[in-house]
Amino acid sequence: EISRECICVVELEAGGKGIAFKKHGKIETPPLLVTPSLSEGNISEPEKFKEAIKNLFNNASISSRHISVAIPDASVKIVFLEFEDIPKEREKIIELIKWNLKKNLPFTVDEAVVDYQITEILSDGSRLYTLIVALMRKAVLAQYENILNELNLTARAIVPSSFAVYNFYHDLLLDVPACAIVTAHKKRIAVMTLKHGKPHFYRSKEISDEKDGLREILVSLNYYHDSCKVMPDRIYLVNSGFETVDLKSEIETHFGRVDVKPIGISDVVRGADSSMSIFAGAAGAALKDED
């Protein structure tokens, strides 16, 4: 996982008793080395960045050359689109997405790389297709891919960090039909609501401090409540760095009778403890498969 404040690497091992941590490592990134952006290259000094990745893999004793990568949320535009009908061909669906978003991007659609996932829902007796769409500027994606290729690393998948965290905890989130997962890092927060385990609403925001982060979390949940007229039955809380703000009690105080359940990496993999939640994005990328 690559972020403004650190880079994490995780190697997982699947066995008869589930998933176990095998190797992991983390390094703090120098200021401004990674600057998340939709429009511009994210890595200010590629050679320094490559050296940091080399040291990270060497120190963690990870030799695998095939990886999956979680990149900053702010480098990817996520939107939800609804259509009454869609083409069968993937290429035509992508063209439909680009046509609908051509006025809402900070770059031309010809410069966009698009990926999507389809969720079918019923509404008022009509079949609607909800698409979760991810867009990146080709030049931004290419910078990540080129640097990794120069390190002889092959990325099987590149996903936004919040969706890597969602991927990691996915099986836990199926217990409640309507829930939310809130991820709190020192410099960023993300709120995602789910219906039957599938994303329904998403907001990610970079923050200045923990009080700012709490405010943005409450704003996100309030916005979802106001726009959808419901609250999630349960809020799963992933604390990956907050120390001075008690997020669980603050959310419970603000929303009243809401079930807030802290979850951590030890709920999913063997050999981990709750203090390792900073690795959730990297572990979620590691679990990413071709689907």
Image (tube, helix red, strand yellow):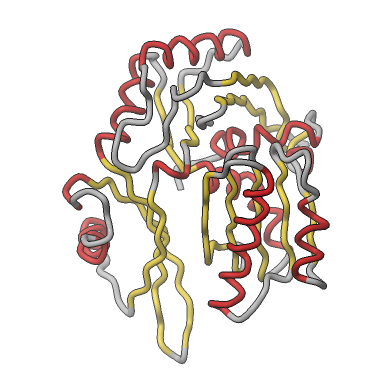
Total numbered labels: 0
**Left or right of residue 149, residue 120 in this image:** right
Q: Nearer the viewer, residue 221 or 87?
A: 221
Q: Quadrant of residue 242?
A: top right
The residue that appears at 52% across and 44% down in the rendered structure is: 206
Is residue 260 found left or right of 224 in the rendered image? right
The spot of residue 16 in percent (x, y) is 75, 35
The location of residue 287, given as percent across then percent down, is 58, 38
Question: Residue 144's spot in the image, x, y percent?
Answer: 36, 28
Residue 23, horizontal then vertical, whole percent: 67, 20
**Residue at 63% over, 13% down:** 60
Residue extending furthest toward the bottom:
125
Above or below, 118 against 77 in this view is below
For the point 53% across and 21% down, which residue is it?
A: 29
Residue 154 left/right relative to 111: right
> Is 258 drawn above or below residue 6 in the view shown?
below
User: Quadrant of the rendered structure where residue 118 is?
Assistant: bottom left
The correct choice, above or below, for 19 with respect to 173 in the image is above
Taking 239 as reference, is 216 left or right?
left
The residue at 48%/27% (across/down) is 67
